[in-house]
Image (spheres, rainbow, N blue to C red):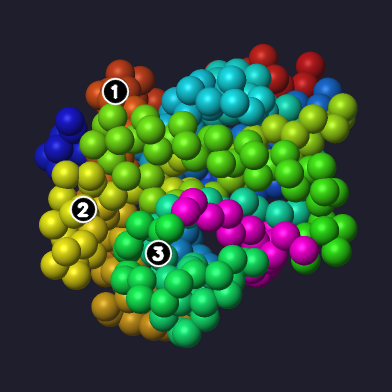
Amino acid sequence: MIDAAALRPWLNHVLRDATIPELPGHYQGKVRENYDLPDGRRIIIATDRLSAFDINLTALPFKGEVLTQTARHWFDQTADICPNHVIEYPDPNVLVCKRLTILPVEIVVRDYLAGTTSTSILSMYRAGAREMYGTRLPDGLRPNQKLPETLITPTTKAFHGGHDEPLTASQILSRGLLSAAQWDEVCTKALALFARGREMARDRGLILVDTKYEFGVDEAGRIMIADEIHTPDSSRWWFLETYDARFAAGERPDSFDKDYVRSWVSARCNPYKDPIPTIPDDVVIGAALAYIQAFERITGRTFEVPADRRPVLDRIRANLAPYMPG
């Protein structure tokens, strides 16, 4: 595995912006840049931006490549369960896919009482809630405990900077967010995808704790998995070998600690109100190494530093030349 010394020369080899004026239909998300082609295809470029506290804090070497290639691993491993939007990968950071109509419900699948956000079941449970997302949990559960059964905890799909809100199945149907047939299908597919991920994770010495799935429909109305799947950004991962001992001791499970930057910033300012201090190189390197470690452990593949040392955007532009308008 690449170490901190080997990564240091790549600190400035990052993709902060992937604006390509020649490509049509540009939309910039927090991490990914999207281009909609006239023929119904979409180009998605994963940048190296690290977003937290509703702002982009910094950029991590190879983060976009790691996310794209981790999702590629899982799209390949789950295509028999659910069709996905993938067409091809013309570059390590780039996915060309079918443009889907994204369903307005995000499907979060959970196996453990965990989480930190306001919509997580642990936060709600600690606040005294027992009925959540249409499911009742028993009293006496401990943080990070395995749930009695795998849960689907849907939320609204927050477009354009909005906030996710918890939903129940009855709310989804009564609001017309999904039809009954669509709801049944996405639940069935999400549970099957999660079961495949959980099984493969265990073989790699990992626990797939929870994950978020985004589904869309194509022009024929077929439901497909979109965005990303089982990446460090969309999923929580713990290390299997230390889970039992740490849970028994009431300690936080070992995980891919991607919060180097978030924790460093939070300890020095109120990131929602104060200017963000300059983030040291060692913190950026530590966070980048965590993403690379996650890729290697999840996929079983060694991350290779690229031989091509061109600026990332120059390489991407060259690889996307066939998609440029004539």
Q: Secondary structure at mark 2?
A: helix
Quarter occupied by residue 177:
bottom right
Q: Is residue 141 left or right of residue 323?
A: left
Q: Can you identify the residue that label 1 sits on?
A: 301
Q: Amino acid at mark 2?
A: Tyr
Range of magenta residues:
149-170
Q: Is residue 292 above or below residue 41?
A: below
Q: Amino acid at mark 1?
A: Arg
Mark 1 or mark 3, earlier in chain: 3
Quarter of the figure with the C terminus: top right
Q: Can you identify the residue that label 3 sits on?
A: 113
**What distance separates the C-alpha of mark 2 from that of mark 3?**
14 Å
Q: Pointer 2 and pointer 3: residues touching (CB < 8 Å)?
A: no
Mark 1 or mark 2, earlier in chain: 2
**What distance separates the C-alpha of mark 1 from that of mark 3?**
30 Å
Residue at point 38% right, 33% down?
A: 199
Q: Is residue 168 above or below residue 110?
A: below
Q: Can you identify the residue that label 2 sits on?
A: 243
Q: Pointer 1 and pointer 2: residues touching (CB < 8 Å)?
A: no
- Label number found at residue 175: none
**Is label 1 or label 3 in front?**
3
Q: Nearer the viewer, residue 227 or 314?
A: 227
Q: Nearer the viewer, residue 158 or 309?
A: 158
Assign the magenta stretch its main secondary structure: loop
Q: Nearer the viewer, residue 288 or 216?
A: 216
Residue 198 seen by the camera: yes
Q: Pointer 1 and pointer 3: residues touching (CB < 8 Å)?
A: no
Position in image of residue 117 (x %, y %): 47, 70
**Is label 1 or label 2 in front?**
2
